[in-house]
Image: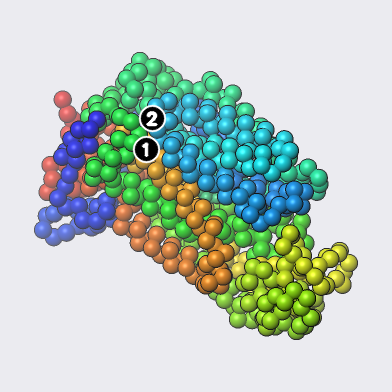
Amino acid sequence: MATSGSRKEDKYSLKHMSHCVGSSRQTADSDGERSLIAPPSGEIGTSDDVTDQQQHTTGFVYVLAFFSAIGGLLFGYDTGVVSGAMLLLKKEMNLNALWQELLVSSTVGAAAVSALSGGYLNDWLGRRICILMSSFIFTVGGIIMGSAPDKVVLLVGRVTVGLGIGLASMTVPVYIAEVSPPQQRGQLVTVNSLFITGGQFISSVVDGAFSYLSPGGWRYMLGLSCLPAVLQFVGFLFLPESPRWLLQKGRSQEAQQVLSQIRGGQNVDDEYDTIKTSIEEEGKDAGAGIVFLQILNHGPTRRALIVGCGLQMFQQLSGINTVMYYSATILQMAGVRDDKQAIWLTTVTSATNFVFSLVGVWLVDKVGRRKLTLGSLLGTGLSLTLLAVGFLLSAQNSPPITLHPGDPDNSTCTQYRFCEACMLDPTCGFCFRENGTQVYDSSCVPVNPVSIDHASWGRCSNMSEVSNSPNWAYNFCPTSYSGVVLMGLILYLAFFAPGMGSMPWTVNSEIYPLWARSTGNACSAGVNWISNVLVSLTFLHIAQFLTYYGAFFLYSGLVVLGLIFVLGCLPETQGLQLEDIENLFAGQLCSCGTTTSKGNRHVHYTRVKGSNCPLSDNDASDVD
Ligand SMILES: O[C@H]1[C@H](O)[C@@H](O)[C@H](O)[C@@H](O)[C@H]1O
């Protein structure tokens, strides 16, 4: 295997490679150099190819995609459910801020570790065993959390599900991509992202429903994930391994049988030959550590890795999880004062994320990954700017503090003159009465160190449901600009979900050659989880230094960087067979030397002037 990288590098290296992957969007040049134009959708392959491939889409592929995507559902459920569970847990288990932080972040941290080690497991044991392992881990984690007698056991349960999430997040997209026919691969892999947001939506409904059950509602919230996990485990006992992995491991007969089963018993000789030839060219793979070094030494795959990791990093740097997490506060700013009502309204936020992920599934094989990602980044950037402007207007019109009570604690809180400064200090909260949009009788007092739900002394220390009792605002200020913020939030989700929410997972499942696929996905999923931890851990500090509007302006700046990155580096992979995609990263935009599922026929994807490639489908030459 050590030689396979350099062998392919020689074969595909092109002197014209200009930037990271030789973007497929460079246009024609005058001196007969290669013009790099990615195919508009529908231009890929001959119509015969497409008909050929469409015949291969069977109901069984949908069954495989559904059972695999339960992994996505569990990923979404277990990352989403904790916020609602925490509201009950912190009261019942008397959790301080550190423990709350631990119970949330430990899962994401464990997911990062298991995603990174998942590459090795995938290569070694195969996709099917990894999916079985992850559903088993989810089940065990759910049981531990649902029956936890104390916070330490709860933490063990959260780490356990984190391990399941990481493994599922990198295995499921790869499995679906490897069993799907090319023309539907985008859609089927994106179903996994739909299930992630679906899991987050279901978790918010479950959180809402069980928030009335105290004590013990959190046990149902956290334990319920066992049900889909068991369903997936049982289902996968009967479902096959990826034919590509089987072939890579030399289990050719089994691979052919599985391929024919997946393709509904049709003749799969051409597809089988294509995969086999590609594997023979690449050579057999080695251990995960070595594969990583090989990726770094092999230009096209290294470029694919940069694209894959970059996409995952920018997904998280766009602030999705901060915005989702912060949505309850945004709704409180907008005037929702009741906690329970705020929980239910966050269901609306996660429903928006879910519904717009559906748009991604619908569009991915119609407009392609590149346009979808670019459009999404543009919209995400603009809506983040709108969010920031909303926060800026709120800050500039922050209500003044009118009461300055005597201060038994000698804290800094009572010194502040405006709500904004009070809100940005994590030790203080804003206590006020209101009449419509009118804020009066306002004071800034220290927050109770045990529970952020009330002040440590004064009018807001003993909150009651009585109608004229004052309001307590921790982390937000009442504002009449909440409409702008709310609009920014909805637009953000509508633009983010179909593109940046889904495409990083989809694109990563298809850009690596088979020998590097597990490791490539492990690295990029690891980058996703690490960036997730970094963004969530830094948000409050950034907000403290830059204020909220500064933080959201910063995210929109990062989205602009993401846009430049995608413009320059992401080629279109729509409709291409997995075995042909690596050529895009070698700048070899014409599929010279590779064959497609049409068998031994060269198929032309893009025009490469001055090369030996055929210039149109009609010119495509038969080999042999
Ligand atoms: O693709 C998913 C999805 O967008 C989720 O809503 C988000 O919470 C995850 O971090 C992300 O990886």
Instruction: Point out residue 447 in the picture as x, y percentages from the top left corner.
Output: 72, 67
From where the camera sits, is residue 33 visible?
yes
| Label 1 Cα neighbours within 10 Å, binned few <14 / some 14-19 / many ≥20 | many
Q: Amino acid at mark 2?
A: Asp
Label annotation for residue 123:
2
| Figure quadrant of residue 30 | bottom left
What's the residue at 62%, 60% (across, down)? 326
For numbered disc 2, what is the local secondary structure?
Answer: helix
Type of amino acid under label 1? Thr
Contact between labelled residues 1 and 2, with CB atoms less than 8 Å apart:
yes
For disc 2, the neighbor class at 10 Å (few under 14, some 14 to 19, many from 20) is many
Q: Position of residue 510 (x, y in %)?
A: 37, 40
User: Which residue matches tag 1?
Assistant: 519
Give the x, y percent position of residue 256.
Answer: 36, 19
Tell me the quadrant of the picture where the C terminus can be found.
top left
Does residue 575 appear in this view?
no
Residue at 47% in and 22% down = 240
Of labels 2 and 1, earlier in sequence is 2
* Above or below, comparing residue 522 to residue 446 in the picture: above
Which of the pair 50/547 is nearer the observer?
A: 547
